[in-house]
Amino acid sequence: MKSVVFENFGKIEVVNIEEPRPKEGFSIVRVIEATLNPIDIFTIMGKRDVKPIPHIPGVEIYGEVIEGTHKGKRVIVYPRLFCGNCEHCFSEREMLCTGEIFGVSTNGGFCEFCLVPEKNIFQIDSDISQELASSLPVGALTAYHALKNVNLGSRVAVIGATGNTGMFSVQIAKLKGAEVFAFSRRKADWLKELGADELIPFEQISRFKGYFDVVVDPLGEKTFEHSIKLLKKGGRFITFGVLTGRTVSFDIFELYSKELSILGATGGSRKEMIELISIARKLKVKVWRKFKLEEIHKAIESMNTKDGKIGIVM
Ligand SMILES: [Zn+2]
C-alpha cells in the first residue's frame, strides 16, 4: 500500500509498504480522507514523543472498516490512546489517561490502510460529508471540549479563527448562544457563514481590552500577552495549543485581582465525541484544498498560507 513514512525527523517519503495484518482488538480501516493538522507537523519534526520509527504520521482520519467489528461501516478515529481502567478513564477523561495519541505514539493514517484499536472507532452516518467527518476527531472535538460550557449570551473571542480548531471554536461558541468575535491575520469572510458575529483583523486586538467573557487562543507564546488582556473581570482564558511557542510571562496581580481563570484543554473524551457526532449536522468545515497522498510535501509547504483545512485523500 501507499504510505507516508519517515525514518529521520523532517524527511518524509511516500513509499510502498506492506498492508497491516489483522490483530485482536484492532480493526483495519481503509483511509478515505485525513486532515493535516499542526500535530502532524510536530510529529514529523520530532517535537513529540514519536513511536514507532520508521513512522507513519496522520492523526485525524475518516475511512471505512474493512476488517473488524464495524466491517463495512464509515468511521472516524478517536485519537487518544487510553487504558479504559484508571481514574481518568472512569471519569470520562480518557484524554488524560496515557497522554498518547494515535498517529504520534502509534502509526497513523497518512496511508491507504491502518490498524486502529476497536475502542477508538466511532461510526459515522453516510450523510455526513467526508470533509466534515475527517475534521471531527481533532479540530471539532478539541473545540467542543474547550467550549461546551460557554454560557448563553457570553462574549467569546476566538484567536486564530481560520485554523482547524479555530473554525470549530467559532461554531461551537455560536451554538452555545455566545456572541462570537473571530480574530485572524487574514480576512476570512467565510467565518461569517460559520457563525462569527464580527471579524476582527489581529492588528486591532488592542481595541478590545477587557471586553470578553471567554478568550480561546491556541496560538501560544506570540499572542498570549494580548489575549489575556481581552478578558473582562471574571473572564476565562482557554488554551489548547502552542503553535507559536510555549513560554510566556504574565502579571499575577491581574490574574487574582480580576479573578481571571486560565484553563487548559486537550482533545476531548469519548463521551464528548458521541455528543459531537450527534450535532455534526449543524457543523460546517471550510476546505482550503485537498492533496493526494503523493502530494504530501506540497500540502505541508502550504500549511502557513492555507485558508481553511487541508485534506489528504488516498
Ligand atoms: Zn486510563
Image (tube, rainbow, N blue to C red):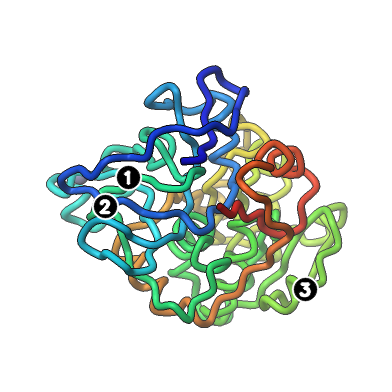
191 is higher (above) or lower (below) than 270: below
Give the residue type at disc 2: Ser
> Nearest the camera: 268 or 31?
31
Q: Earlier in the sequence, mark 1 or mark 3?
A: 1
Q: Helix or strand or loop: what does disc 3 sit on? A: strand
Left or right: 269 as drawn, with respect to 32: left
175 is higher (above) or lower (below) than 142: below
249 is higher (above) or lower (below) than 228: above
Give the residue type at disc 3: Glu
Q: Is mark 3 within 8 Å of ligand 1?
A: no
> Nearest the camera: 19 or 166?
19
The picture places residue 220, in percent across and down from the top left corner, at 63, 40
- Report, in whole angstroms, how far the alpha carbon at label 3 lies from the one at label 2: 44 Å
Q: Which mark is residue 137?
A: none
Residue that mark 1 sits on: 115
Q: Earlier in the sequence, mark 3 or mark 2?
A: 2
Q: In which image quadrant can residue 216 be found? A: bottom right
Decide: marks 2, 1 in contact (CB < 8 A)?
A: yes
Left or right: 297 as drawn, with respect to 267: right
Residue that mark 3 sits on: 198
Circle 2 Cα neighbour tier, 10 Å, few/some/many (<14 / 14–19 / ≥20): many
Give the residue type at disc 1: Leu
Q: Which mark is residue 27?
A: 2
Circle 3 Cα neighbour tier, 10 Å, few/some/many (<14 / 14–19 / ≥20): some
